[in-house]
Amino acid sequence: MKKFFVVFSIFLLAGCFIATPVARANEDTPDYQATVSTGFSMVNKTYDHFETDVFEMDSAVNNMLISVNAIKSESCLFRAYARFRYAKSGQWTKFLAFDSEYHFATIEPVAAYQLYFVVRDPMKGKTEVPSFTAQGVYIDEKLMEYVMQEPDSFEPEKIAPKPTVTSRQAWGARPPKSSYSQHVVQRLVVHHSWIPNQSQYKGALSIRGIQNYHMDDPKTGWTDIGYHFLIGPEGTIYQGRPETVVGAHASPNTNAVGICLIGDYDPGKDPIPPVMEKSLVELLTWLCSNYRVNPGVNIYGHCDYSPKSCPGQEVYKRLPQYRKDIIAVIGQK
């Protein structure tokens, strides 16, 4: 009986391992990373607030992603605020309001930050903020100047049809932790997942794995899956965050739509399936025409902002051809 139990336990363990695909995806390695416990809790009160210490960073950054882990009562009104101190001038920004995820991008780097939480609850329920995460990335200031400028207007001659997209409900997405921040679609950024690669891909199960990693890992703790779209090797397009809201995929995230190809597309790794490539071009074509994004200048690879090779050298070297193909379909007035 004991031998049977051991064998059965190993079988269950193996089954769990197989059922849960590896999912990490190819995010940037932050120049600054912190997970901070706050200990803030409000119960049996109608109002309370909490101000964190000022956090100094060893190296200045010009992109910050703050994710607050807030466990809110149904009746509470919760608001978080963050402010940042510029490295050169020493001046602080005003406190900037957000719900649970805030993206800060600036040309001049910042060297310190501070958070402030406010809770109002007429029903005196329990609200906690156990922790928050902060990730900072430095991007060359000339590149930041270029990226943050408003792009020239673009008018396509025709609007391409939207390809079939698997809804969040269909792939079993978790609801976001809180509301999103709206943005204007101006840039499209192509990624690859790296992990999972094609052999590790398990359909919707892998997409859920990436979402769980983005939302639950102590170093991220984001509001939702970071990408707006993900494309499987078989060509399935999955809806991540709505494309009209800020994602978490490549700083600066605001106004940038992130599209992740599942697989590893560096030389000698996964081949690029034609059906996946077709889905990518159709999705890019629709986004460019529907949101007036100039494909000639505003389709990027993740590596344009990062030292990573993402979206893989094999995909990146095809981007110029994709841009030409898209213009050939939608034209330009």
Image (spheres, helix red, strand yellow):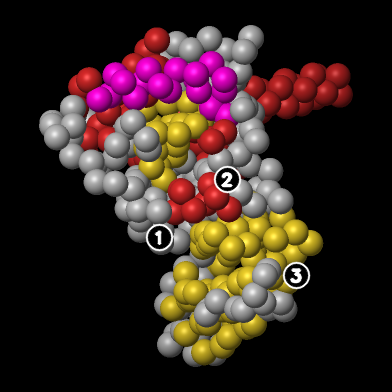
Residue shown at 65% from the left, 75% from the top: 89
Q: Which label sits in the foreground, 2 or 1? A: 1
Residue 50 in the image, given as x and y percentages of width and height = 62, 83
Which amino acid type is shown beneath numbered disc 1? Answer: Ser
Q: Which label sits in the foreground, 3 or 1? A: 3
Residues at circles 3 and 1 in contact by the CB criterion of under 8 Å: no
- Residue 68 appears anywhere in the view: yes
Q: Tell whether 100 sits left or right of 269.
A: left
Q: Is residue 324 magenta?
A: yes
Q: Nearer the viewer, residue 161 or 217?
A: 161
Q: Earlier in the sequence, mark 3 or mark 1?
A: 3
Circle 2 packing at 10 Å, graded few (<14), some (14-19), many (20+), is: many
Q: Mark 1 — residue?
A: 181
Q: CA distance from mark 2 to mark 1?
A: 17 Å
Residue 23 in the image, given as x and y percentages of width and height = 61, 32
Q: Earlier in the sequence, mark 2 or mark 1?
A: 1
Q: Mark 3 — residue?
A: 56
Q: Mark 2 — residue?
A: 214
Residue shown at 45% from the left, 61% from the top: 178
Q: Earlier in the sequence, mark 2 or mark 3?
A: 3
